[in-house]
Amino acid sequence: MQITQEVFTEYLKTMSLRDRGVDEMDFLPFYSKYKDVAVKETRTIKITAGDLGVPRGEYMLLENYCTDKSCDCRKVMINVVEVNSPQRIFATIGYGWETLAFYTKWMHGDKEIARMITGAYLELGGIQSQYAQHFLEVFKASLTDEYVNTIKRHYRMFKDYSHRKKKRISYS
């Protein structure tokens, strides 16, 4: 099945119902800033066997990035949603692609939290279903160099978008 803007729109409607307003440390969907890129480059996984512990179907891995302009967390939050039913989040997966040393420094020396956010993990406080742990394993198996590079590129695009300043026209 092809991912369309309508699928993303349905997902965003669901998210806006839960939205409490964007503040400094919120995460927003990559799609909210780069619709065309997201439609073309959002990763999907197709589950065809029932023995993986998750329902058969096609699932989107929807990327969300930090809105804090001063933050350089170098992580993504992935919402796993079914393409045919994007209103339901099956798992919220965090993925930090940097080293333990990077996250320890970023967490001001807290090695325990740094360990938790290095690599792929179920996001604390994220929406999780009974299938979340299984989706985490499927996500880990899908982490090719190409996919990780796409996530990094999307992160940089999202951060660069957040740092843009509107050009002012001078009338003097």
Image (tube, rainbow, N blue to C red):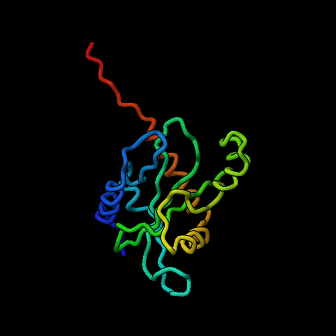
Q: Is residue 34 left or right of residue 98?
A: left
x and y, in percent, of residue 96 in the image: 61, 54
Rendered view: 130 above or below 144: below
Question: What's the residue at 66%, 41% (across, down)?
Answer: 106
Q: Residue lying furthest top in this view? A: 172
Residue in the foreground of this view, choosing between 170 and 78: 78
Task: Work out which quarter of the rendered image holds the C terminus and state it.
Answer: top left
Name of the residue lying farthest toward the bottom: 50
Q: Quadrant of the N terminus?
A: bottom left
Image check: 82 left or right of 149? left
Image coords of residue 142 (percent x, y): 58, 70
- Position of 86 with respect to 64 (left or right) is left
Hey, which residue is sitting farthest left in the picture? 171
Q: Quadrant of residue 71?
A: top right
Most foreground residue, 75 or 149: 75
Identified at 34% across, 74% down, the residue is 84
Q: Position of residue 112 (x, y in %)?
A: 71, 51
